[in-house]
Image (spheres, rainbow, N blue to C red):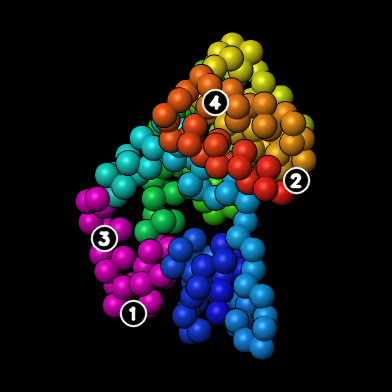
Amino acid sequence: MFCTKCGEKIKPDARFCHACGAAASQDKAVKQAGGTMRPQKQNWLHSFGAFLLIPIFAVIVILLFWKNKDPDPIVQASTNNAAQNESPNMAAMQQVHATLERLKKNLEANPKDLVAMDSLAVMYSIAGSHDKALNYYKIHLEIEPDNKDIKIAMALTYHNLRNDSRAIELLQEVLEKEPDYLFGLYYLAEIQEAQHNHEEAARHWQEIIEKHPGTQLAKAAEERLAEQHADE
């Protein structure tokens, strides 16, 4: 049986996908039997992995895990009780909710707490609540209107909300001020490719290869160009 969200193989009796956390059900999951095709994986832009390429979000994720390394005693006790009475997934979900509430309280106490703001946005993005994530990005941008990483995160969120025209506008804003910015070029290429603007996508991938040789994203750009040529 395979997850209908990310395509990973999951156990027949699993309640959640171990790879992406999506709920699994017998009527929605896809079984590999009788020639049934395995579902296609989602475009990588829809996954949280894309955010880890943006420096600010790698730091946020580290801070989130570090902050929850030694949670409040009350939260720890409730989590331990849940772990004894419920499945590990339920205990993990309770910990996530506790983290969300703590971040919201931090933001209420300090409306300019950018770490709490961005952490909430990332967590809502993981959960697929892109409209809520977008609101936090907008608030951040009001405080730091020139923050290019937040603009890129907003662009990816708009892409997930099927508003690619706005996503492209934001990425172009970033590149107008910093034409060689690696992440701006790469995400613009990916969204252009998703929009079937193959020539524009190829042009940006080629820019990355020429301007940022040897980087991880340059290698990824080479692979994307090769895939594009193979499909022609």
Residue highlighted by disc 2: 232
Counting from the top left corner in percent of width and height, residue 215 is at 42, 30
Q: Which mark is residue 76?
A: 3
Compared with 210, 131 (above or below) is below
Q: Is residue 79 magenta?
A: yes
Q: Quadrant of residue 73?
A: bottom left
**Which of the two discs, 1 and 4, labels the residue nearer the N terminus?**
1
Judged from the image, the secondary structure of the residue bearing numbered disc 3 is: helix
Counting from the top left corner in percent of width and height, residue 182 is at 51, 25
* Amino acid type at mark 1: Asn
Q: Is residue 229 magenta?
A: no
**Which of the two discs, 1 and 2, labels the residue nearer the N terminus?**
1
Compared with 111, 106 (above or below) is below
* Amino acid type at mark 2: Glu
- The residue at 27%/69% (across/down) is 80
* Gap in angstroms between the C-alphas marked 4 and 2: 21 Å
Residue highlighted by disc 4: 208
Judged by depth in the image, the label closer to the viewer, 4 or 3, is 4
Compared with 182, 78 (above or below) is below
Counting from the top left corner in percent of width and height, residue 199 is at 74, 31
Judged from the image, the secondary structure of the residue bearing numbered disc 1 is: helix
* Amino acid type at mark 3: Gln
> Are the residues tagged 1 and 3 within 8 Å (C-beta)?
no
- The residue at 47%/23% (across/down) is 212
Q: Give the magenta part as a residue range.
A: 69-94
- The residue at 63%/77% (across/down) is 30
Residue highlighted by disc 1: 85
**Which of the two discs, 3 and 2, labels the residue nearer the N terminus?**
3
